[in-house]
Image: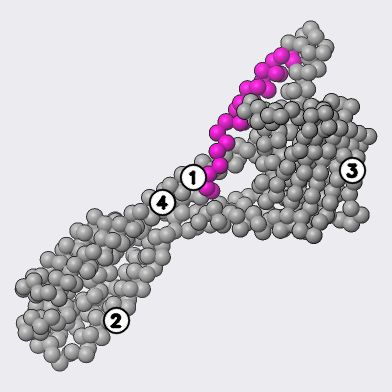
Amino acid sequence: MPRRERVVRMSVEQPLWRALAGYRVLTMFYAVGLFATAYDRYPRPGIAIAYYCVLCVWTLATLPRVANAASCTKRFLAVDLALALTGILLTLVADTHARIADGGPTLPSIWTAGSVLAFAIKGGWRWAAFASTLVAVANLVERGVPARDTVHNVILVWVASIAIGYVVEVARASERTLARALEIEAATRERERLARDIHDGVLQVLAMVQRRGAVLGGEAAELGRMAGEQEVALRTLVSGGLVPVSRVSQDAAEGAVVRVVEEETDASEPVDLRSLLAPYAGSRVSLAEPGAPVPLPPAVAREVAAAVGAALDNVREHAGEDARAWILVEDEPEAVVVTVRDDGPGIPEGRLAQAEGEGRLGVAQSIRGRLRDVGGTAELISVPGQGTEVELNVPKQAKRARRARGRAESR
């Protein structure tokens, strides 16, 4: 049954925006509460009240602006920082000089740090350094002298914002690297799938045409020669660039890292593996199976059956049309084991590695590749003169194991 790819959005930066939105609201209430507790100490409380009205309306109205990087524009950052700087300087008008000299809080208090952090998350450490420097200058102007507590607070905001900005830049670089990795592996996975399908179909036909043409001679021999050349070219094409990498991608439009998850489009019941292997039985292929059904997820059962078919194709191609083969299906408690054995001449030592180097991917992709994709293993045992045995082992929790492995690779 067909499968499709579902895109799951992720972003290491998104939690920072949510935290910033919460920080702005909490510090807004903190600044208002701080003023309320010292209301009678302000000589001009009307100025402070007017500022806090503007601050509250602005903070609540602009929450969508700090939802993500796309919404947080440069114009918004400039107005937001201007509001924080204005509040710091208005403290000179609303409060007394004695309270300011004694280290009294500014009107926006720690709300100012939210403006600086927005710069850090949006533009990195350079933007953070610029915003925190302006805040430092405004604090020094408001205080009049570089007192110890003022310098301490300024340095704290400066270092914290620059550090957060640097972390954001590193996270974004990691996302781009992971995005490129997904693009490469997505292409590689598709290439592997096409390589298996081509090997099971087109390459087998071309090889047969080449052999029959050589036997018939004449124009058929020329046709066989051309089929042989096309087979070599096609093997070279499908075998190039098969390099496994992490499967992660990026939605460039919104800067969100995504993970590609394979899922079945049809959530049907498990199928009986025996029904898929039965068509392979014949006069020269014996099938031994349990008396009870051997249930497997549909996708897993299809891949196992296709791997068995590829193993039988290799028997016919390398052991000859007269070779006999046996298929044994074992339904064990933890796994399903399918063994394909033949009475051919066996495989000489080093022949598999040589074939893979020549681009012949029958064992590497059509058998081992299929089992690897469903969380199983394929073992090949061959002794020259004593035939070849291919053992396919599929854990009964293969689908769950594959999902767990996919999650581990995406971290």
| Picture quadrant where residue 208 is located | top right
Q: Give the label on residue 29, or none.
A: 2
Q: Taking 75 as reference, is 347 left or right?
A: right
> Which is closer to the viewer, label 3 or label 4?
3
Residue pointed to by mark 4 = 174
Q: Closer to the N terminus: mark 4 or mark 1?
A: 4
Q: Taking 127 as reference, is 302 left or right?
A: right
Residue 116 is situated, as x and y percent measured from the top left of the image, at 25, 65
Q: Closer to the N terminus: mark 1 or mark 3?
A: 1
Q: CA distance from mark 2 to mark 4?
A: 36 Å
Q: Closer to the N terminus: mark 3 or mark 2?
A: 2
Seen from the viewer's position, the closer of residues 153 and 262 is 153
* Magenta residue check for 286: no
Q: CA distance from mark 4 to mark 1?
A: 11 Å
Residue pointed to by mark 3 = 287
The magenta stretch is 223-247
* Magenta residue check for 243: yes
> Which is closer to the viewer, label 3 or label 2?
3
Q: Closer to the N terminus: mark 2 or mark 4?
A: 2
> Which is closer to the viewer, label 2 or label 4?
4
Q: Do the CB atoms of the residues marked 4 and 1 lie less than 8 Å apart?
A: no
- Say which amino acid is labelled 2: Phe
Seen from the viewer's position, the closer of residues 216 and 287 is 287
Q: CA distance from mark 2 to mark 1?
A: 45 Å
- Say which amino acid is labelled 4: Ser
Q: Taking 122 as reference, is 294 left or right?
A: right
> Which is closer to the viewer, label 1 or label 3?
3
Residue pointed to by mark 1 = 181
